Image (tube, grey):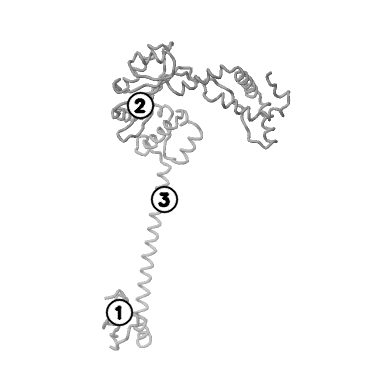
Amino acid sequence: MSKSVYSEIWTYFTLCDAERARCKICTNEYFRKRRTTTAMRNHLKSMHTNEFAELEKCEKEKKDALSIIATSFQKSVKSEIKQMLFQERVDKTKQWDNKSVKSLAVDKSISEMIALEDLPFSFVESAGFVRLVKHLCPSYNLKSRQYFTSFICDELYDKVSQKILELLKAFEKMSFTSDIWSDSCSGVSLLSLTCHGITEDFERKMIVLKASVFNESRHTGENIACKLEGLLSSWEIPKEKVKCLVRDAGSNMKKGVTLLNIEHIDCASHKIQNILKEGLKAQETVVIAITKCKKMATHFHHSNTAQDELKAIQKRLNQTPLKILQECTTRWNSTFICLSVFCKSKSLCVYMRPQIIKFPN
């Protein structure tokens, strides 16, 4: 039976078939066009007025009851939504516990960012970062730099080093690069050791194992050998798995690696740089040109007036601004870059006032 049978009109009619209905009062049958109740309602309205009035009364009472139920339901839903919104607002302002899963997940993400981007630990206390974290996640309690120092140096380092150990053990053979240099900021010497290997899937891997502080006052071959041996032992790398070590041409590095009884070769780039350096020294005219360019670069570097004058001339001639760079013996290509810039700026320097720049003879 169709859903329309449950209408109040069926109190006064009986369903004969899908398209006909019989009046219970006068027993007349009526055709249900499109199976609607319109014809039956019109029959009651014209032939049985009292019954039609009762029908309208019942329908009105039913409609009012449904309206009350709907209104009550809407109020209930609105109340629940308000309660949910209020609870969400409370949850957003409520501070997470420092040991909660969410808080620890954010700690880990911040620690990984510091490590991957090589940021100082003080970054977490900078005003901009504190504001950003408070805006993105008000419930998170940002920790101090001491916390992240401990987290990265202990927990995060242990996890990463464990994965590196597994990778090193998977290498059948390994090659290494090593160098010693002085850090101008901290004033200490550092010895680096970088591993190069190929996985079973023929994927090349490069791992910086450590840049260790070289506490020994003298960079002798014996001290270097002792330091390198300690680095290899700390990563559980047997000498039998070391294919080769690439180093600079310094006699102390050569002696240190020789004492370790490890095959080693000179760094090709370092050797080419030394050849070029010695070759330039043999050319007197080139040495004179480099010396003059170094003096001019030093003058530009220490004179803001000369720099401003050069920029003004470049702008007036509609040329691309060029910065005068100083030549540095330990920075490869710096000599070439310095000479190239002066070759491009030669015509510009002619326009500069003599009192602004004094060219060397």
Give the quadrant of residue 19: bottom left
Mark 2 in CB contact with mark 3 (< 8 angstroms): no
Q: Which residue is mark 1?
A: 10
Q: Is residue 82 left or right of residue 353?
A: left
Kindly identify which residue carries mark 2.
154
Hey, which quadrant is residue 167 in on the image? top left
Residue count near mark 1 (Cα–Cα under 10 Å), binned few <14, some 14–19, many ≥20: some
Please report the residue visible at 39 percent of the width from the left and 55 percent of the height from the top. Answer: 79
Looking at the rendered structure, the kind of residue marked 3 is Leu
Q: Earlier in the sequence, mark 1 or mark 3?
A: 1
Spatial separation of the CA atoms under disc 1 and disc 3: 46 Å
Residue at the (58%, 18%) spot, across then down: 283
Tell me how far mark 1 sits from mark 2, CA to CA.
Answer: 81 Å
Nearest the camera: 42 or 316?
316
Horizontal and vertical percent position of residue 143? 42, 32
Instruction: Identify the element where label 1 is drawn.
Output: helix
Residue type pointed to by label 1: Trp
Label located before the other in sequence (2 or 3): 3
Quadrant of the rendering where the N terminus is positioned:
bottom left
Mark 2 is on which residue type?
Asp
Q: Which residue is mark 3?
A: 85
